[in-house]
Amino acid sequence: MQAGFPNIDLKADALLLDVDGTLIDIAPTPEEVVVPEQLRLSLHVLWDHSQGATALVSGRPLASLDSLFAPLRLPASGTHGAQLRARATSSQLEFEAPLFPDELRRELDHLGQKFAAVRIEDKRYSLAFHYRGHEALETALVTELENRMKALPPGFELLRGKAILEIRPQGVNKGEAVRRLLRYAPFKGRRPVFLGDDHTDEDCLRVLPEFGGIGVAVGRDLKGAAYRVNSPEEVRHWLAQLARV
Ligand SMILES: [Mg+2]
């Protein structure tokens, strides 16, 4: 892994950017993050100079991305690949995962009574179970969810993260989102350059070789990244320089 950033050709490359921890500093809650005005400006110029091939690839829903960066609106994949908008101005999505079935949500909500310390988060396309600070519950919760999964229609999987379990549709992740995005103009045929900071971003890094792409890890080493930089601040500085081209 090389320190620093790769060389970019805005006429031939597509810039694909994770948001939290990559473009902006992580805050105690997702609502408290701040988008510096200079970043908004850089992204607008880069979007323009790349003929629209600058996109956000985030775990946040599109609505959250749009309000965070308003008035700027960019092509984006939201909710870990569950939503895709290939053109900034389009109101139509190129892809949207099926919504998490209401019936299942209601059924799984009952688990809240059995596991009072577990916080259930409705992510529209998936259901997440947070148990930070209550790690002793993990085994029982996994067993319970695995049993419930047997009653689900096919097409769902149980993902295990750090103090979080999530039931989500199979094949919906940031890596698939990048594959999908690169099927559409103006991204099609370009070399993807992806920047990310998290293990969920490794799904993107894994698909980059299919497109001759390059990955940049921010703040930590990530599998599949060719470059590594230290902080979102460095990323913002680099983008500001690129935008001056
Ligand atoms: Mg991130």
Image (cartoon, rainbow, N blue to C red):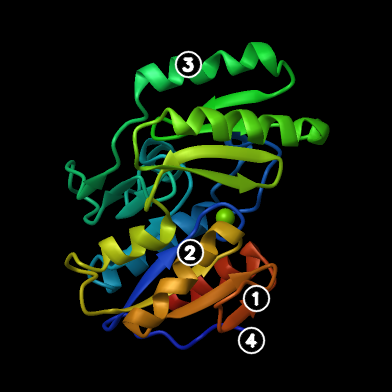
Among numbered discs 2 and 1, the one appearing first in the sequence? 2
Instruction: State whether label 3 is within 8 Å of ligand 1.
Output: no
Is label 4 within 8 A of ligand 1 (CB to nearest ligand atom)? Answer: no
Identify the image quadrant of residue 43.
bottom left
Q: Quadrant of ligand 1?
A: bottom right
| Secondary structure state at the residue bearing disc 4 | loop
Q: CA distance from mark 4 to mark 1?
A: 10 Å
Q: Which residue is mark 2?
A: 203
The residue labelled by disc 4 is 1
Give the distance between the C-alpha atoms of the residues marked 2 and 4, in whole angstroms: 18 Å
Please tell me whether residue 111 is drawn above or below residue 68 in the rendered image.
above
Task: Name the foreground residue: 136 vs 244.
Answer: 136
Q: Viewed as shown, does residue 231 lie left or right of 191?
A: right
Residue annotated with mark 1 = 229
Name the spot of residue 149 as percent of width and height, x first.
48, 33
**Badge 3: residue crowd in 10 Å (few <14, some 14–19, many ≥20):** few
Residue at the spot of label 3: 107
